[in-house]
Image (cartoon, rainbow, N blue to C red):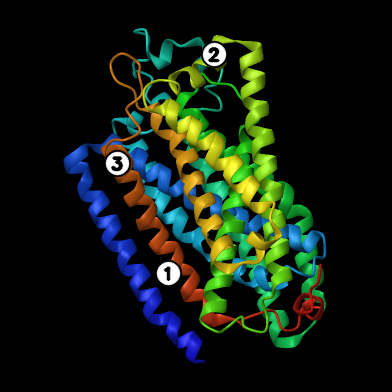
Amino acid sequence: MSNHAESSPLAAKALYVGLVGIAITALGILVSGAQTIAMAWLVGITFWTAIAIGMLLLILIHHIFDASWSVLLRRQFEHGITAFKWLALLFLPLIVASWIAPHDVVWPWMNLAHETHGGRTVGTDILYLKKSSFLNLDMFTGMTVLFFGIWIWLSARLRKASFNQDADGNSAWTSMSRKTAAFGIPLVALSLSGAAIYWVKSLEYHWFSTMYGVWFFTNCVRGAISVGVLMTLWLYARGDYKGILNKNHLHSIGQLMLAFTVFWAYVTFSQYFLIWNANVPEETFWYNIREYGDWWYVGMFILFGHFFVPFFTLLSYRFKVTHHIIKRIAYWILATILVDICYNILPAIKDAHGNPEPFLSIQLLWAILAVISIGGICVWSYLKSFPTAKLIPIRDPRITECLTHHE
């Protein structure tokens, strides 16, 4: 009970950080303009929604594989996915701004009179006209509502089954979770791909990529695993997980981190190689503008920071099971995911010559503030849910295997 009580002041602090950050960000419209703030807000929403989607996916994967070692980690993810309803609410200003003129405050294709590079308008652009049945404000709004609806609904089903099993121990709840996973995984796969395409890829709607949904998926899972590391080590440090979390759990988590690091490299290289090899202007321009100015250095940081650094560190067994080292690796991966999302979103803002704004600019500071603000709300949502259930799923059929997990 005392540990639960300790969560209350932390939750209040997280909520305070979130609300103050939101207020400052809103006032930033007067300083930096609506487009700058909206794009920064999109960075924050995309970052935290990706992590929440990753948590949801890992819960579903846990159930479909009937895993044992991840039972204790699953409970923390079940608290984390309560953030979806708040993320939906925080996404609302972007939709409202898109319905109020000028419609192109974020996504240029929402305004048919928006001038594209070369003096044309969106409404006269053949590439837009061919996609207009997909890229229109009504469809965007409806699909965004549908995406969040799917994630919130699946989260509610999984939490209900898990928490009720703590009370009555009925194995029928495990069966319900497995059935939810069976149809939930394809639903989440499709919805996260749609969200990535609508929210991020369509900022530069000329661009084509068949790998984009998979790129987003890898960042979702890598972000969720990294946050999972921080959650479990936080609980261990304050005494909750002592005698529960062991080196074998951390080693298994570290193996997942390593696997998805390699998968991210495979997906990202494949996307770049296919576009470079085809050499089609509607595809290559996306990379060309990101080799301009300091964005080239950002690309190099992503290459080495997203792959080589975590890859070589996670090869070590000792690094995976040493608390302060695996914690730093988790922070590093989260930071590079944020840079990767900035790399995909912020260059969509271009000057009169069609060149992207510099990476090191006021835009980046607003994006970081948005991440902190939305993060405060997500942490508050997690801490608010934390006292509502047992620390671990005590009546899960696999809990004994989990607590005695060995390599």
Q: Amino acid at mark 2?
A: Glu
Expressed as whole percent of the image width and height from the top left, the position of residue 259 reads 71, 48
Which disc number belongs to residue 282? Answer: 2
The quadrant in which residue 364 appears is: top left
Residue 342, compared with residue 407, is above or below; it is above
Expressed as whole percent of the image width and height from the top left, the position of residue 71 reads 72, 71
Could you tell me if the residues under marks 1 and 2 are in contact, i.e. CB atoms within 8 Å? no
Which of the two residues, 211 or 305, is positioned nearer the viewer here? Answer: 305
Q: Amino acid at mark 1?
A: Trp
Q: Residue at x 70, y 79 (%)?
A: 393
Which of the two residues, 108 or 367, is positioned nearer the viewer here? Answer: 367
Q: What element does badge 2 sit on?
A: helix
Q: What element does badge 1 sit on?
A: helix
Residue 153 visible in the picture: yes
Residue hosting label 1:
380
Spatial distance from mark 3 to mark 1, Cα to Cα? Answer: 23 Å
Q: What element does badge 3 sit on?
A: helix
Q: Amino acid at mark 3?
A: Ile
Q: Earlier in the sequence, mark 1 or mark 2?
A: 2
Residue hosting label 3:
37
